[in-house]
Image (cartoon, grey):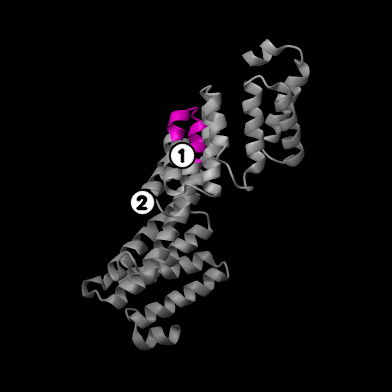
Amino acid sequence: HDRLLRWRGPDSLDTAQASLDLARVWRTQTRFEQAERLTRTTLARLQALAAGSSPALSLRLAEAHELLGTIAHEQGRYGVAETAHREALAQRLALEGERGSGAATARANLAQALLRQGELESRFGGREAASAVYLRLAAEAPQRPEAIEALLELADLTLTQRGDPEGARRALEQVLKVRPRGPSADRARLLLCEASLRQGDLDEAAGHLEYVAGQAHAAEALFRQAEVDFFAGEYETARQGLEEFAHQASRDEQANDALDLLLLLEEHADAGDALRAY
């Protein structure tokens, strides 16, 4: 790299390629600060050449932005990664159009950065910021699997933290339009079941469960069916379902909810009216 720098000079595309290759090596060695510094220096030199733009220059610019995005992503700096991957996508689209493999990779990188950014915001209490990121991802890349995941996360957040079943329903209906079958569809229907339970519509809740077909969410489907039975006053059926769920999914987040309902059934075994009021 140093020999090429002296021979060709800092503004050569060959030097830029060698610099990016070295930065990639440093990244794999987790020397992130050095890798980012070299990539940013190379990017600045490339941008200074943009007046004489060429496909080769555009390709190096795209690669530099992609590398910056990857470095930021691996450090958990998802907002920085989003910005870099947007720049990379713009370069790739100008070079290849929508159907190019590089553009597809750049779009995937951007989608992953957005999804992780939303998850981070949600985990640390940034509910509104998380919702905004999820909506942005769903609007920009609706066919990407990350967009489906974003809509599911948005629906979960809207339902459990905002207490807004209708808002959750809108996001889930978008999921089912794109993925009418499969694990994502099953998860969407389970969340729709929960939304219906919160609105007191037991028939609709049970109807959503009828379409949950896969094994990936079988345990949660069992729990939701037990909830439907519980609120319908079918206490013995609910008890059996809750006990089976608690046995199958003892480490599941919903196991505590199942145990709470089982305790309630034990404490009020002869008090049907009190249970219905609950």
What span is colored magenta in the figure? 153-169
* In the foreground, 27 or 91: 91
User: Which dot, 1 or 2, sits closer to the camera?
Assistant: 1
Q: Is residue 13 visible?
A: yes
* In the foreground, 18 or 238: 238
Kindly identify which numbered label has been placed on residue 140: 2
Looking at the image, is 107 positioned above or below residue 49?
A: above
Q: Does the magenta stretch include residue 168?
A: yes
| Comes first in the chain, label 1 or label 2 | 2
Rendered location of residue 24, percent (x, y) = 49, 72
Name the secondary structure under disc 1.
helix
* In the foreground, 150 or 239: 239
According to the picture, the residue beneath numbered tag 1 turns out to be: 172
Report the residue that reaches farthest toward the left. 51
Q: Quadrant of residue 54?
A: bottom left
The amino acid sitting under disc 2 is Glu
Q: Residues within 10 Å of mark 1 (few under 14, many from 20)?
A: many
Q: Quadrant of residue 53?
A: bottom left
For the residues marked 1 and 2, what is the alpha-carbon distance in whole angstroms? Answer: 17 Å
Q: Residues within 10 Å of mark 2 (few under 14, many from 20)?
A: few
The amino acid sitting under disc 1 is Leu
Magenta stretch, main secondary structure, is helix
Is mark 1 in CB contact (under 8 Å) with mark 2?
no
Looking at the image, is 240 positioned above or below residue 65?
A: above
Name the secondary structure under disc 2.
helix
Q: Does the magenta stretch include residue 243?
A: no
Looking at the image, is 136 positioned above or below residue 27?
A: above
Looking at the figure, which quarter contains the C terminus?
A: top right
Q: Is residue 124 visible?
A: no
